[in-house]
Image: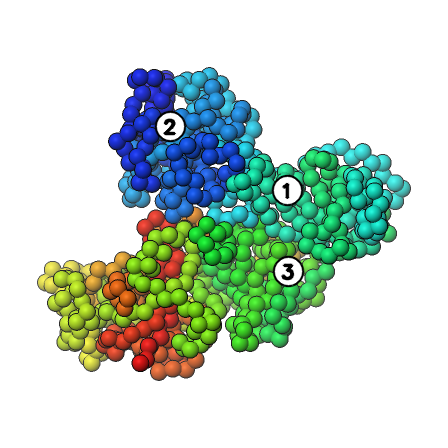
Amino acid sequence: MAADSCVFHRTLTRSRSGPNKLSWSGSWSRSGSRSPSSAVGCRELLLVVDVRRYSRDQGSAVYFPQAVLSGDDLYDITLTEGHCRLQVTLDPGLNRLVERHVLRPGATLSNAAFTPALSAQLPGCLGASGDRDSYRLVSVEVRDEAAGEEDDTGRTHVDWDSLPWFGSSGQTGGTPPGGTPPAGPLVPLRASRTVFLPLWNNVDHSGEMWRSAPPTEEDEDEEEEGGRRPTVTVSELRDAFLSGRRGVAKGTVHRQLIVRIINKSHLMYYGRSDQTCQCPYKAVLQVSDRTGSVCVVLWNSMCVNWYRCLKPGDIIRLRRYRVKQHYQAHNDDIEISVNSRNPAAQVSLLPESSISPECVPPAPIYTFYSSGELLDRPHGNICDVIGLLTFSGRSERIRSKDGRWAELLEYRWLRLEDGSCDQPIMVKLFSTSQPETHLKLHPLSVVVCTHLKLVRPADGTRGCSYLTNTTYTQVYCTGLGHHSQMSYRKLRPVQHFLQWLKRQDDGQVLSRALIGGFFIYPPPPVSLEMYMKERRGEVGFLRGAELQRDLERLCYRERRTFCIQATVTMVTYSRIGEEDHCLFWMDRSSSLSPSSSSTSSSPRPSTSSPRSSLPSPIPSSPHSSRPPLSPSPLSPTSPSSAISQTLSSRKSNKRRKLLLSETPKKRLPRVMFHPEQNNQTVILFQASMEFLENTEEDSDEDEDTSSFTTAPLPPAFPPVAMETLPSWYSHIHREEQALALAMGGRLTCGRFDSAHRDYYTLRLRALSDGVLLDTIFLPHYSSSSTDPHSNTWPSILSHGAFSSHTPPPAPADLIATAAQLTNQRLVCVLEACHLGGARTELILSRAFQLTD
């Protein structure tokens, strides 16, 4: 390829051309600071192939002399112009673009400005050119998604990994690409690290360096007759260390230890910006032999080589290790340190058949509890569970502690059913260093979670307890062949669950299988007094401007709860895709917008033609069920409903008549018939068969359409995000759904069948400073059965849902009674989650009336 045809060659050679290099001193970066005068600009469109994160070290500040390193993270970006790839470092002032999921893989960039900089990784870094130069991205514009889609239509199917690296010929950076890239994996440019961090948490492994198969090594041992035998036991090591024997307490232990892995922790990252460690990871294995148990700690590159290769139940042999005082225990316990140097430990994975029968370590012990048995277990109880997954929530993140730069922890909610009682097993599952497994956690999978901790509410409410992670939590699910490899498949509780699973009907399970959407659990209190008591009186009310500021600080998929005092000035009822027509009420006295000043708070009733009946009360989520397959009956608009004017213009009426003439008289059912329902137990039968072998399932899913007559001039509200409303699980599109709801994914309108097509929007006016906030309100479903209440606005807002004991009011009737909210002072509990880019979800979960 000619040099002139390479965008990177034409652009980056100007940074070395002395007096002829282009000055970008007048360009502004997204961080608000001017780009360095030495930067060179690229006016061509560039595509982001990959974004990689790592923590800075002591030397990283050298590479950013003009930047303020306020956080620990640095990002290397892989770019392409279609012919080659270039790895550059993002200026720390632009980190916010990644943290808000604006600059992401697949994004299109324009007006990018680069400056040359030395690499920390020398030599052998794929991103550095032949003379050891690399580049820093100091200014950029991220194009809108719509524009990017138009520009990328011709290159969506390109294999970016097959493109050569810029300057990979081994000559100077001005040489066009096309040579053979240097050997070795990609490494960070501005820190002496050998591994990248995952983008969204510090727990999972990331990158091609993490081995999935054990390292090959020559077996130096001669097998004894009858199999291998250990030359030292756990109890002997413990006694020797505690008695102070020098060979164990001070030096390297060469004697062969054979143990079985009982529990395996998640990966623990301990890298800090004030320390230099190339691979700052550790993982803890709880192991045992016939004489006792002990913790084995894998350090640094031993995690990279062995973490993914080992699982509970495996038998390993250790040599050349150190025995140390247990870092979390008292003086009477030890741990075994396994490192890659000083000394270089030797680890081997052994088949059980190679061990002498009298030396085989005991198998792991599992403690399975059914959903019924969990009701009576105490808070903090450690247990294992197995169940059929019927709800898989979207991935979100929360701060590990207070503070702007605290670590973000990734989690999701799961609902498991096992048939032992009506109460499902709710699991708040954080990352377990099993990213491949977490992507398989979709409904109709058989899921086993081990070493979970029971969390019971302080008031002792039985129905709102849930399970969550411990250090040693592991997850196994259908689709990866886990169950057939694990010893728990033979246990009586597991066999009892499989018997129940075989009796289940695919169609019945599909009717309540949901994925994604806003979800809150346990449900918040239903009174201000109870809420204040739960918060220990420290509600922390924010002013409207303070709330807006905190919303801007949220990172991608970060979830936080806020409280403000406000009044309701507008209520809107809408449906997905039909937001231009809605039912709404507005408090005219508090309206400030010219467009809404003409809308009366008590308009005359609708006189439009009969509309399709609004959907039946939407059950609680994730305890929802599919709507019936038969068409819903028609019902006219209530003449007593004081809803906003619904008369359309002549043009709108003409268009509506045309649409009606083209629409069949008989409405299509909301949910199309599923082919897999002909064979009622295929999916669940195959899921259970993985305990014998690994199988694949398949089914089909269609979408529904419906419409209704609405107001012609609705208020200007942003439509609800597709990630906010749960979707019906589609077995045939299960992989695509799982990816869309994982970190970095995104749902698009109409791609999957939404379980809830309608929603309410409430406009709040902060009492403190008058700031207006638009919040989504979802009373159709809740995380549990609600107490009986009157289904008036005050009771609906305080419970966050309609009463589960009486039919809910029709949306038109509910909008008609919204005048009850006029001038009512409310304590509003808001759930915020940043969904990427400029999209921030703000949900009104509770609103309590303030009384004088």
- Indicate whether 667 appears above or below 139: below
Q: Which residue is mark 3?
A: 451
Q: Is residue 228 left or right of residue 436?
A: right
The quarter in which the N terminus is drawn is top left
Q: Which residue is mark 1?
A: 303
- Indicate whether 356 appears above or below 429: above
Q: Amino acid at mark 2?
A: Thr
Q: Nearer the viewer, residue 352 or 128?
A: 128
Q: Is residue 759 left or right of residue 73?
A: left
Query: Depth-wise, is mark 3 or mark 2 nearer the camera?
Result: 2
Q: Residue at x 18, y 67 (%)?
A: 591
Q: Is residue 90 visible?
A: yes
Q: Which residue is mark 2?
A: 115
In space, the residues marked 3 and 1 are separated at their CA atoms by 21 Å
Q: Residue at x 17, y 71 (%)?
A: 588
Q: Secondary structure at mark 3?
A: strand
Q: Nearer the viewer, residue 778 or 25?
A: 25
How far across and how far down the image is residue 30, in percent?
32, 40
Ranked by sequence position, the earlier of labels 1 and 2 is 2
How far across and how far down the image is residue 391, in percent?
49, 62
Q: Residues within 10 Å of mark 2 (few under 14, many from 20)?
A: many
Q: Residue at x 63, y 40 (%)?
A: 300
Q: Amino acid at mark 3?
A: His
Ranked by sequence position, the earlier of labels 3 and 1 is 1
Q: Amino acid at mark 1?
A: Cys
Ranked by sequence position, the earlier of labels 3 and 2 is 2
In space, the residues marked 3 and 2 are separated at their CA atoms by 50 Å
Q: Secondary structure at mark 2?
A: strand
How far across and how far down the image is residue 424, in percent?
54, 70
In space, the residues marked 1 and 2 are separated at their CA atoms by 36 Å
Rendered image: mark on residue 224? none
